Image (cartoon, rainbow, N blue to C red):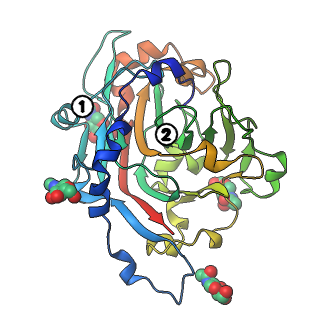
């Protein structure tokens, strides 16, 4: 998420404070899925560690509902676990998919805040392969959805934005935010090492009081975000994070590699990533640590408002929030979130 005020964020009781006491629950959720691994068809060294999926998705030992003031100044009331579930904004469907949505039934007056959901994993990670399958993601004027990971001491422990955009965007933005300290950048030479649909945006990852843009790639494939993502059944995002590099891939629903479907993922077989960050330009280990997985949909707020008309919306963001029908497409439909370790 962009435009996070460090001062505000640091003052918040971040969900990750609970991580260390409860880390063992993640261990209990470890699955023995690698028993089924077919070593003749995959050279993957990754083993499934945590699988967030199905009727136990909202087990309170797995996710924290962030219900404090939005650090990015949205017109949003993030809901507690109990409220989100009683208001029908967070639920698991009979088919085992998980829905996280913005309220699309309440009429408001301009300037009032709309209910939405932001969840963060209880467990935190210092690397791994993160793979998430979504059948749908939120889109529409006044929405700012994101699937990301973030460390407790922002920006010094870093932020990795895997899916992010605003309003009627037709492209995904993939971003790192880092602290100052040693340099952390995208090198322009990486343009030959990424997917043909990706372009480099900003090179500088460090977020400061004057620039919170982060270092960015744009995936220009219209299937990577919003309406175009949903129209073909969504797809899979993968983020491979180790001390050498952070790489991210997008696979539309019809193009998901079989090793991902079989849960024996081998990133080296996937071709050029949509986003590449390497330790030649950034000391990954010193800038990124103790990340929790986060999924949210903000309503208005920094980036949404600064590019409101630029991303195809008319009127004001606050007026748009007032009409619930503007949020009929503002929902995540999650098949699973998986974390693998080597
Ligand atoms: C696995 O490794 C072998 C030997 O290096 C190679 O021939 C094969 O193509 C690899 N398989 C995959 C799925 O990468
Ligand atoms: C929630 O997770 C805990 C720890 O893994 C487990 O003991 C408990 O049975 C789970 N509860 C439900 C409702 O799935
Ligand atoms: C780039 O996007 C176009 C439009 O969706 C798609 O047809 C093409 O396969 C994509 N190319 C790559 C390398 O992903
Ligand atoms: C809210 O959005 C959902 C999902 O798009 C839709 O099925 C439902 O009809 C909407 N509710 C109202 C009151 O329009």
Instruction: Tell me: residue 209, above or below residue 297.
Output: above
* Label pair 1/2, CB-CB below 8 angstroms: no
Where residue 231 sits: x, y (%)?
48, 50
Q: Find numbered disc 1 in the image and state the secondary structure of the residue it sits on.
A: loop
Compared to 194, does 294 lie above or below?
A: above
Residue at image point 49% right, 61% down: 253
Q: Find out if the beta carbon at label 2 lies less than 8 Å from the nearest ligand 2 atom.
A: no
The residue where tag 1 is placed is 80
Q: Residue furthest bottom?
A: 40
Q: Position of residue 154 (x, y in %)?
A: 52, 31
In this rendered view, identify the residue nearer to me: 134 or 242.
Answer: 242
Name the residue that disc number 2 marks. 151
Residue drawn at the location 29% of the way across and 29% of the way down: 103
Q: Residues within 10 Å of mark 1 (few under 14, many from 20)?
A: some
| Quarter of image, res 74 | top left
Q: Nearer the viewer, residue 293 or 222?
A: 293
Residue extending furthest toward the top: 110
Residue at 30% across / 29% down in the picture?
Answer: 104
- Using the rendered image of the protein, determine whether residue 109 is visible from the camera's viewpoint: yes
Q: Residues within 10 Å of mark 2 (few under 14, many from 20)?
A: many
Relative to 303, is 294 on the left or the right? left
SS for tag 2?
loop
User: Where is ligand 4, by quadrant?
Assistant: top left
């Amino acid at each position: 998420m962009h435009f996070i005020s460090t001062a505000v964020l640091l003052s918040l009781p971040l969900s990750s404070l609970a991580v260390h006491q409860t880390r063992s629950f993640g261990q209990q959720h470890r699955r023995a899925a690698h028993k089924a691994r077919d070593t003749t068809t995959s050279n993957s060294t990754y083993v499934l560690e945590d699988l967030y999926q199905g009727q136990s998705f909202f087990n309170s030992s797995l996710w924290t509902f962030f219900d404090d003031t939005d650090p990015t100044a949205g017109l949003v009331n993030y809901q507690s676990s109990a409220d989100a579930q009683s208001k029908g904004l967070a639920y698991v469907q009979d088919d085992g998919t998980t829905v996280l949505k913005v309220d699309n039934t309440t009429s408001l007056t301009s300037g009032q805040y709309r209910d939405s959901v932001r969840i963060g994993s209880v467990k935190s990670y210092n690397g791994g392969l993160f793979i998430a399958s979504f059948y749908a993601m939120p889109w529409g004027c006044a929405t700012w959805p994101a699937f990301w990971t973030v460390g407790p001491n922002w920006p010094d422990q870093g932020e990795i934005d895997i899916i992010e955009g605003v309003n009627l965007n037709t492209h995904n933005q993939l971003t790192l935010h880092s602290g100052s300290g040693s340099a952390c950048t995208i090198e322009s030479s990486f343009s030959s090492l990424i997917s043909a649909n990706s372009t480099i945006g900003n090179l500088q990852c460090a977020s400061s009081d004057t620039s919170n843009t982060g270092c960015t790639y744009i995936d220009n494939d219209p299937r990577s975000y919003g309406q175009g993502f949903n129209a073909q059944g969504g797809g899979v995002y993968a983020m491979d994070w180790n001390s050498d590099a952070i790489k991210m891939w997008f696979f539309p629903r019809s193009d998901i590699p079989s090793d991902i479907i079989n849960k024996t993922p081998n990133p080296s077989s996937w071709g050029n990533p949509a986003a590449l960050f390497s330790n030649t330009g950034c000391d990954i280990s010193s800038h990124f640590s103790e990340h929790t997985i986060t999924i949210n949909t903000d309503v208005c707020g920094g980036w949404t408002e600064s590019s409101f008309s630029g991303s195809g919306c008319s009127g004001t963001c606050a007026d748009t929030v007032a009409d619930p029908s503007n949020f009929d497409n503002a929902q995540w439909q999650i098949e699973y979130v998986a974390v693998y370790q080597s």
